[in-house]
Image: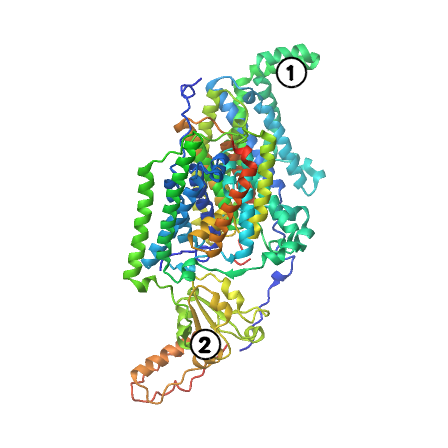
Amino acid sequence: MEPVEIDSGRHNPGVDPGLHIWGWEIPVYLFLGGLVAGLMVITAMAELRGGRPRSPILRMAPFGALVLLSLGMGALFLDLGHKLYVWRFYMAFRPTSPMSWGSWILVLVYPVGILHGLGSISDTARASARRRLGRVGGWIVGGATFADRVRAPILWLSLVLGAGLGVYTGLLLGTTPARMLWNSAVLGPLFLVSGLSTGAALLLLFPMDDGERHQLARFDAVAILAEMSVLGLYLVGLGSGGAPQRAAAATLLGGAWTAPFWGLVIVLGLVTPLALETIEQRLGRPFTRLAPMLVLIGGFSLRAILVAAGQDTSFRLFP
Amino acid sequence: MSPLDSKVPRPPAAFWNPYVAGVALGLVLTATFLVMGFGLGGSGAANRIAIGAAHVVAPATVEANGYFGSFVGPGTRILDDWLVFEVLGMFLGGSIAAYSAGRMHLHVGSTQGIGTATRLAYSLGGGILMGVAARLARGCTSGQALTGGSVLSLGSWVFMFAVFAGGYLVAPLVRRQWR
Amino acid sequence: MIFPLQPLGDFGRETGLVLGVLFGMAFGFVLERAGFGRASNLAAQFYGGDNRVLKVMFTGIATTAVLLGLLSSLGMLALDQLTVPETWIGPQIVGGLLLGAGFVVAGYCPGTGVVAAASGSIDGVVTYFGVMLGTLVFGAAWPYLEGFYGSGGRGSVRLDQMLGLPFPVVALLVVALAVSAFASVERLEGWLAKRRAGTAPDRAPVLRNGSLGIVGLMAVTGVGTGWTQPAAAQPESHAPGAIDAFTLATRIVDDPTGLWLVDLRDPGSCEAARIPGATCRPADDADGQFLADLPPSRTLVVYGGADLVVPPGAERWHGRVEVLTGGYGAFQHDVLAAPALPAEPTLAQLHDWQRRSALQGYFTGSTAAPPPVAVTPRKAPASGSTRKGGGC
C-alpha cells in the first residue's frame, strides 16, 4: 500500500482566521443590554396600562437602566479594537446594518431614559429635591415638569426604543452569518423576550408593592413561556436547515455545549423559575427571590453560551 | 392589596413518612442505575469545585500536587463532570421541594442552644472533617453508603457502619447543639 | 439485557450530563421531602429519639438492591455492568468514622447540605463550603496520606460474590436486616420517649407496613424468579470468545459502531498497518489496562500478530470480549489477500468466493470483481481466478 499524503493549507494559521475573538465582554454587554431593554419596556408598559407605579423601585428603574446601559457600553468599549475611533460609528448611518442601528439606538436611549426617569419622580421627592438641593433641585423639578407634559410620547418612545434595543442585541450576533449558530432571524425576538424576563426578574429582587409584584411575577412567567417557545423555534429552525445549520444545532443537541445549555439555560434558567412562580401562584407560598435570581443566571448563561458556542460553528463542515 | 395576597399562607407541609420517602429514594436511585449504570453522589462536586477554584488561584501549586494533579491539566475541564451536573440538579430539585412545601426562607437552622456564630462554626468544622473523610473513603453518605450499599459493595457497607459508629461516638460531645 | 442503558457511552456524554441534572433534581426533591434539609432531623439520629435517617436510608438501600436483583432475575439487567464502588477497607473505616463525626457536628452530610442550602439554610451553605475546604486540606496533606489512601484495596467486591449467594438472595437478607433494625429502633424510640417524657415520632403503621411489604414482596419475587430461572440469574459469562477473520470483517462492514477493535501489537507495527477501524494500544500499556475503561456497551475485539492470550486489562472489562483467531496475520491472509476460486467451483464455493471478493474489495479499496457471469458450476471460469486485488 502506498502511503497517502493529504495536503491541506489549513495548517497555516493565517488561512482560517482567528474565530474565538469574543471573550467575556460581549456576553456581559448583551446581557446588560437585554436587561435595559426589559426595564424600559416593562416600566413604560406598566405605566401606559396601569398609571403611575407605586413601588419606588419601578420609579427608579429608568435611571437604573441608564446606569446598567453605561456599564454595558463600557464592556463593549473594552472589546473594541480601535477605541479611539468609536466616534466613527456616528459619522454614518447604514440602514442595512444592525450595528449602525444599534449604535444610534444606544444614543437615543439616554435622553428618552432621562425624561422617562424625571417624569417618574414622585411629588414628595420633587418637593424635597426643591427644598434640599437648591438650584440643582430647581433644574430637576423643571425637567420633571417638562417630562410630565410629554409623558405619553416619552413612554411610547421608551417602549419602542426598548424593544428595538432588545431585538438589536440578538441581531448583533446575526451580523456574522458565517457563525451558523447565530445565523437565525429568531435570535432578535429570543433576546428580546429573554431581556423582558431578566428585566422583570431584576425588579423582583427589590422590595415592592405586593400587587405590582404579583403582576410582575405573572409577566415574568409569561415571558419565560414565550422564551421557551422562541427557543424551540430557534432550535427547530436550525435543525431543519442545511448541513452546516444542523451541525450548529448539534452543538446544543448532543454536542459540546449541550450540557451547559440544557442544564443552565433550560432547566436552571427557565423550567425551575417557572415551576417556582407557578407554585407561588397556585399554592400561595410567600414570594421567594430564588426564582428571579435563577432567571438572571439563566439569561446570562444563554448569551454566554450562544456567544461561545457560536464561535465553534461555521460553514466549514470539517473544522 | 390584590385578593391573592389576602390569602392566608398555608402552613408548611409535613415531611414524608420515612419509609415512603425511603422507597421513593430507592426508585430514584434504581432509575439512575438502570439508565446511567452508576449511582448518585454528593461530595464529588465539592471536590471538583474546590480543586477548580484552587487551580484558578494557584495553578502551579495545584498541578504539582499529587492528588489534585490528576484532576487538572491541559485539555481537562474540571467542572465538566456528571457529579457536578447532578449536584446542580439536587439544588434545583431541593429548592422546588422546599418551596412547594412552604419551607423556603433564608435562615440559620438549629441555633437554639448555641447561637448563630457557634452554629456556623460547627457547620464549617463538620464540613471540613467530612471533606477530608469523603476523599479518604472515596465517597460520602450518598456516593458510598447509599449508592454502594445498594449494589452490595463490601467497602460501602463497612463505610456505612463506620459512619454510624463515628456519629454515635462524637454525639455526646456536641449534645448541647441539638437540644 | 436492556439495562443499564449507559448514555455516557451510547447516546453521548453530553446527553448523560443533562440526565444528571434531571436525576439530581429527583434526588434533591426526595431528600428535601424526607426531611433531610433540616439539621435537627438528621442529627437526631445520633441521640436515638428519632431514627429518620436510618429508616429512610436503609429503606432506600433495600428498595434499590431488591429492584436491581429482581430485574437481573428477569434477565433485564446486567448486574456486572453496574459500577460498584471499590473497597478500600482501612481508608473506608477511618473515613467513615471521620465522616460520622463531621456529620453530627455539622448536622448535615455533604449531599443533604446541598438540599439544606436549596431551602435557604445558611448552615447548609457553610457546611458544603466546609466540604470544599476539606478537599483542599486533604490535598495539602496528601504526601502524608498517600500511603494510607492506597492501602487495603480489594477492587470492586460485592457481598453476594463474597458470600457465594445470588444477588436477589442477599437483597432479601438486606430487607430482613432492615426490618429487624426498624423494629429495634421503633422500640428504642418508644422507650426513650417515655423516659424523656416526650413523644415518639409518628408511627403511621399503614404506610410503614405497606412500603416495607411491597419491598419484601419484590424481594421474594426476585429470589423466586432467580430460583426458577437459574440461567437468567447467572452473571453473564466473561470467558472470551473467539472470532475468525472473515466473520470479523463482515461485522466491521455491517455494524462498525458495535465493536471496539483494539490492536495489541506493538504500536509501531500498528501504526504501519492495522485492521481498518482498530485502535492502537498506548506504548506504555502492554497489558492493555486502558481496555478496562472502555464503556462496555460494545463488543470488544482484540488481536495481536498471531494468536493472543487475553490481556489482564480486557479481563477486568465488563463487557463481552472476543479474540481474533490468528491475529493480524489471519486477517491479512483471509481478508486482504485476493480469494482464490477453485478450478471447478460448486455453487456454494462460488457464493463464498463472491462474498470474500466483495470483502477484499471493501478493505483493500479495489472494487469487487464482477462475478463471472458465464460460469456455471462444475465448469472452469474463463477468468476470475487470475484476478488480483489492486491495493490502494
* Left or right of residue A305, residue A78 in this image: right
Figure check: C317 above or below A41: below
Front-lying residue, A73 or B114? B114
Figure check: B158 above or below B21: below
Q: Are marks 2 and 1 on the same chain?
A: no
- Look at the image and tell me whether residue C384 can be seen: yes
Q: Secondary structure at mark 1?
A: helix
Q: Secondary structure at mark 2?
A: loop
Residue C59: quarter of image: top left
Q: Amino acid at mark 2?
A: Ser
* Left or right of residue C10, residue A309 in this image: right
Q: Amino acid at mark 1?
A: Ile
Q: Residue at x 48, y 42 (%)?
A: B90
| Scheme by which the image is coloured | rainbow
Which residue, given by chain and number where applicable, does mark 2 sit on? Answer: C366
Subunit under mark 2:
C
Which residue, given by chain and number where applicable, does mark 1 sit on? Answer: A140
Front-lying residue, C224 or B72? C224
Q: Callout 2: 10 Å neighbours few (<14), some, many (20+)?
A: some
Q: Position of residue B17 (x, y in %)?
A: 38, 37
Numbered marks: total: 2
**Is the N terminus of chain B in the top left, top right, bottom left or bottom right quadrant?**
top left
CA–CA distance in space, label 2 to label 1: 87 Å
Q: Callout 1: 10 Å neighbours few (<14), some, many (20+)?
A: some
Q: Residue at x 32, y 86 (%)?
A: C345
- Look at the image and tell me whether residue A177 can be seen: no
* Left or right of residue C203, residue B104 in this image: right
Subunit under mark 1:
A
- Extreme-right residue of the structure: A84
Q: Position of residue C254 (x, y in %)?
A: 39, 68
- Extreme-left residue of the structure: C228
